[in-house]
Amino acid sequence: MTKELSTGSGIENTLSTLKKYETGMRILLEGAQANTGQTPKEVIWTKNKAKLYRYAPEVEKRFPVPILLIYALINRPYVLDLMPGNSLVEYLVNQGFDVYMLDWGTPGDEDKNLTFENYVLDYIPRAVRKVLKHSHAEEFTLLGFCMGGTLSAMYAALFPDKPLRNLILLTAPIDFTLENLGLYGVWMDEKNFNPALLADAFGNIPGDLIDTGNRMVKPVTNYVGTYVTMWDRILQDKSMDTWLAMNKWVNDDVPFPGAAFKQWIREFYQQNKLVKGQIFLRGRRVDLSRITCPVLNIAGKRDHICTLPQAEATMRLIGSKDKEFYVLDAGHVGLVTGSDARKNLWPHLRNWLAPRSE
Amino acid sequence: MPEGGKSHGSADPAALWRQWSETTSKAWSSALEASKEQYADSYNLYRSWAKSVGNAPDPTRLNPLGRMNPKEVWKLWFDSTVGVWRTAAESGGDPLGFLTVWLKLMEDTQARILSGEALPTNLFAFYKQWYDATSDTWARFVEDTIGSEKFLEMVRPFLESYTTFLKTFRNAEEEYLRSLQIPTRSDVARVAELVTSLEEKIDQIDDAFEDGYARMATRQSIAELDKRLSQLESKLTPLSTVAEKVESIETIPQRLEQVENKLALLSIVAEKVGPIESIMQRLGQVEGKLDTLPGVLEKVSKVEGLPQRMDQVESKLSAVLAALEKLVAQASAESAKPATTASRKAPRKTTSQPEVKSSESPVGAE
């Protein structure tokens, strides 16, 4: 009996190990599969490839001021709604906020000439109008993540008055002083990199090229460490849900419109025009000191995409009196997802926003 | 014409690829300071390593796996692997120093793992242990390398070469497909761009409606507009008649000019007039003087009777004189008759004077 059990256990162990290796190999070959962005939502407006989502509330709306989330032009916005239980959007909706999100979609070849003028002056204002109309509100909160934060700050500088009630910047790069950017600073130096070369050759910059650039900031962690973690979790029978969702998101790239890419690298990274007040969108100067609404600025100590000084500069540039700089011991994405975000960021966000959304 | 570049005709894309491959290899060779005879390529390290592996002793032949303990297996594996990497590093082709760092990592790990403290039980556990022990060093080295000026000097020409080639290749493809009368990707993109522009125009119209700048015209609103236009026309017709009757507009400027001149004079006069207070004082003085006037006037009215009385006196005196003359004449006639003629020739001075009646006393009128 004991011998049979032992033999059975050995076979089971072997089968189990084989199964685990099969799981790992499948992920490596087919890519991570995960059901992301599950919070129920409806599309209330579209423009070109962009879509404006309204998340369906499951609880009674407690705050009359809606929130509009603006995502970056790279990667997909579902990192803010990664999966049930690990979703900033879901949390906010369950707290009684009326949440909207602008998804830029996937640019095609025909969008290679889109610029920041289009995004800040055409897309965002229209999305704002639709949000206000849909929510029957007179004011709204703008929440920008990463480059979406930069876009949001520019919008707030150009349209500082009503209906903008609050501005939340989640790891939003504003100051592009090269010395503060680590490896990015070296690569983006004018003498090393001419963005026009890529834009002219590709039209839209391929998403995987952008992704490679981002991963190369921490190459060993991103190219090796990620998969060490994967095997470790598989072999130790740990939950793979979050890893799969994150890995799917990391590899889910979108192209960057060529003209906007040139602007982004040239005017922001190489010439650092935003902090100097030298960004002009259709002749309108983007002056961050015109931002006077309440501002919550959030950054991560271990963020290599948007470093701490990049985000911190916002505090001295804006004209708001009601402003807070909230720093977490987290990386670029770990700031908004995972257990630390659940414990720290989300409640803080809620507590800051609630009295300002009455 | 394809966008942004000169036409390269329908060049063979395969030939272009070959051309680019050779150019790029040369660029890398130059950057890596490789020998003139041999182009550097991304497989050079691998070739060096493979060659060394071929020369390494086969541990399984010397010591069959089944009869060895795990520690011996790991030791053999380390010995052979480290030896292989060392040989590969010594054979050259490692301009960035990857192998040197790798070797050091291997030797460190070998020392740590074989010290007997924590012997890995399976391949993954060993690998994980090795990764945890070395990843920081390895990451620091890689980041230093890809951030170094030497690395960037290599990347710059590669990037330029690659993008130039890509652009040329795409243009050639476009031309090639065009010559075959096949719509290209950029043709489709152009159509999509037109659709996007159209959508933008619809958005603008949508904005206009939402802003209230435009509203949909209904039949009723048009009828109302028509009615109001008719009313406006009927009001305009009498206005034109009135306008004809109005004096020529040309005279208005002249008259205005005159008015302006008068106003200018008035302003000058106004400037000359003293302060109102002094005028009031002077008016007071004038009033005071006027108050004295009635007394004076009474005196004057009395004086006014004097001329009449003087006339009366004069007339009485005239009568007295006439009476005296008459008396004188009678007296002289009585004294000298011959002198009658003379008395007839006496001047008739008093004929115009009223006759004095005998009953009137010339003095009594005084």
Image: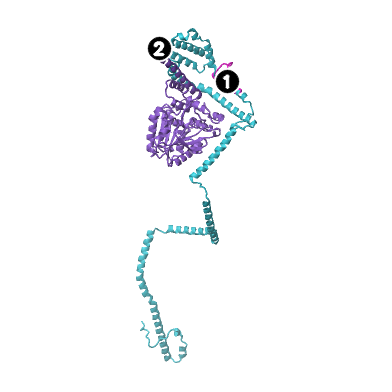
Chain colours: A purple, B cyan
Mark sitting earlier along the chain (1/2): 1
Q: Which chain carries label 1?
A: B
Q: Residue B283, located in which quarter of the rendered image? A: bottom left
Badge 2 element: loop
| Total tally of numbered discs in the picture | 2
| Amino acid type shown at disc 1 | Ser
- A291 or B311: nearer the viewer: A291
Mark 1, residue position: B25
| Amino acid type shown at disc 2 | Gly
Question: Can you see residue B159?
Answer: yes
For disc 2, the neighbor class at 10 Å (few under 14, some 14 to 19, many from 20) is: few
Q: Residue A217, image x and y in percent?
A: 47, 25
- B157 or A255: nearer the viewer: A255
- Farthest residue toward the bottom? B337
Q: Which chain carries label 2?
A: B
- For the record, the magenta segment spans B18-38
Q: Residue A170, image x and y in percent?
A: 43, 32
